[in-house]
Amino acid sequence: MDAWETRRRPNRLERRFEFQTYELTRDFLERLGALSESKKIFPDISFGKTYVNITLRPQSDEEGAQVTDVEKKFAARIDELAD
């Protein structure tokens, strides 16, 4: 969780993952997709050949919603995928 950055306006968590090859990047994205489907949490994702940027926003659409334990636990699960 230490590598995730907390941002404000809007509140969110962000992290960049870097990989040695495109195949490793693609494998990570496939596992992330499966995790997202199973948890019904869908982060914003951008990626290139050897990197993936992920943004987790609060589940609530209310203005001023804060990042909760749900997002933090999901971020920790994403970290496990990268290990």
Image: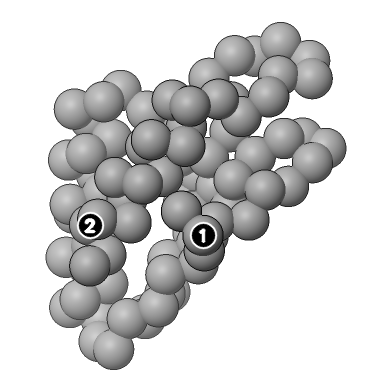
Q: Which residue is mark 1?
A: 2
The numbered mark, 1 or 2, whose residue comes first in the sequence reads 1
The answer to whether residue 75 is visible is yes
Q: Is residue 27 above or below residue 65?
A: below
Q: Identify the residue at image location x=42%, y=70%.
A: 17
Mark 1 and mark 2 residues within 8 Å of each other at the beta carbon? no
Question: Amino acid type of disc 2?
Answer: Leu
Q: Is residue 20 above or below residue 42?
A: below
Q: Identify the residue at image location x=65%, y=39%.
A: 12
The color scheme shown is: one colour
Q: Horizontal placement of 7 versus 50: left or right?
A: right
Secondary structure, mark 1, is: loop
Give how far across and how far down residue 66 sits, in percent: 68, 24
Q: Residues within 10 Å of mark 1 (few under 14, many from 20)?
A: few
Give how far across and how far down residue 52 sits, in percent: 42, 66
Residue found farthest to the right: 9
Q: Which mark is residue 81?
A: 2
Q: If the image is split into quadrants, where does the C terminus sit?
A: bottom left
Is 28 in front, or is 83? Answer: 83
Give how far across and how far down residue 43 sits, in percent: 45, 39
When asked about the image quadrant of residue 61, the answer is: top right
Q: Whole-Å distance between the Cαs marked 1 and 2?
A: 15 Å
Question: Amino acid type of disc 1?
Answer: Asp
Q: Identify the residue at image location x=79%, y=41%.
A: 8
Q: Horizontal placement of 34 versus 9: left or right?
A: left
The answer to whether residue 47 is visible is no
Residue found farthest to the front: 2
Q: Residues within 10 Å of mark 2 (few under 14, many from 20)?
A: some
Is 37 in front, or is 81? Answer: 81
